[in-house]
Image (cartoon, rainbow, N blue to C red):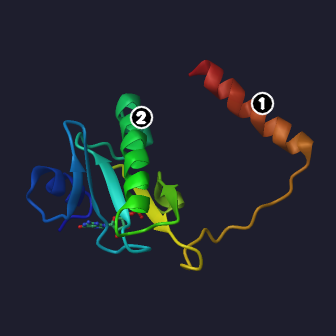
Amino acid sequence: MDPYSIFSDIVAGRAPASRVFEDDDVVAFMDIRPFTPGHVLVIPKQPARNLAELDPEIGAKLFQVGQRLAAALRDSEVAADGVNFFLADGIAAGQEVFHVHLHVIPRTSGDGFGLRGRPTSPHRADLDYLASSIRGTLERS
Ligand code: 5GP
């Protein structure tokens, strides 16, 4: 299978998937290599390789469906105590499949899942400098 189109194949029904939700805009299905049991992916039906290509309304829909799934992961037999959302945008961020997808990862204490990065403690001036740069870019977009 071509990793660049596997999710489009799932949307089209050409590749197998254990679906948990579907509507006109999105599909949610079980990740075949779950970080924890019950790990679900939510994807747009319309292919978008990255966030820049994703229609913001569909992006909002991904989050809405993720919210519903989070509740279902707590209330179903998955019996999650907590949930992490994760979205990798770009190779540097760990993206492997280039069709936007929101990971919805059920958590229980001691499950071993976690981000490896350590938080840093920058000076306020550094935070302000980058905030100004990001703000300026937002204002121009
Ligand atoms: P990424 O690293 O791009 O954020 O995550 C890609 C995810 O897609 C991985 O968690 C991987 O296990 C999952 N995945 C890759 N190929 C398939 C597939 O064919 N079917 C399903 N259900 N999940 C897949």
Instruction: Name the residue: 38% across, 74% down.
Output: 37
Q: Which of the numbered marks, if any, corresponds to residue 60?
A: 2
Residue 9 figure quarter: bottom left
Quarter occupied by residue 120? bottom right
- The numbered dot on residue 132 is 1
Where, quadrant-wise, is the N terminus in this rendering? bottom left
Please tell me whether mark 2 sits on a helix, a strand or a loop: helix
Image height check: is 19 above or below 44? below
- Of circles 2 and 1, the one toward us is 2
Foreground residue, 107 or 15?
A: 107
Measuring 8% from the left and 59% from the top, which residue is drawn there? 14
Tell me residue 10's x, y (percent).
Answer: 17, 57
Q: Secondary structure at mark 1?
A: helix
Above or below 36: residue 96:
above
Residue type, label 1: Ser
Check the image and report above or below for 25 versus 33.
above
Q: Amino acid at mark 2?
A: Ala
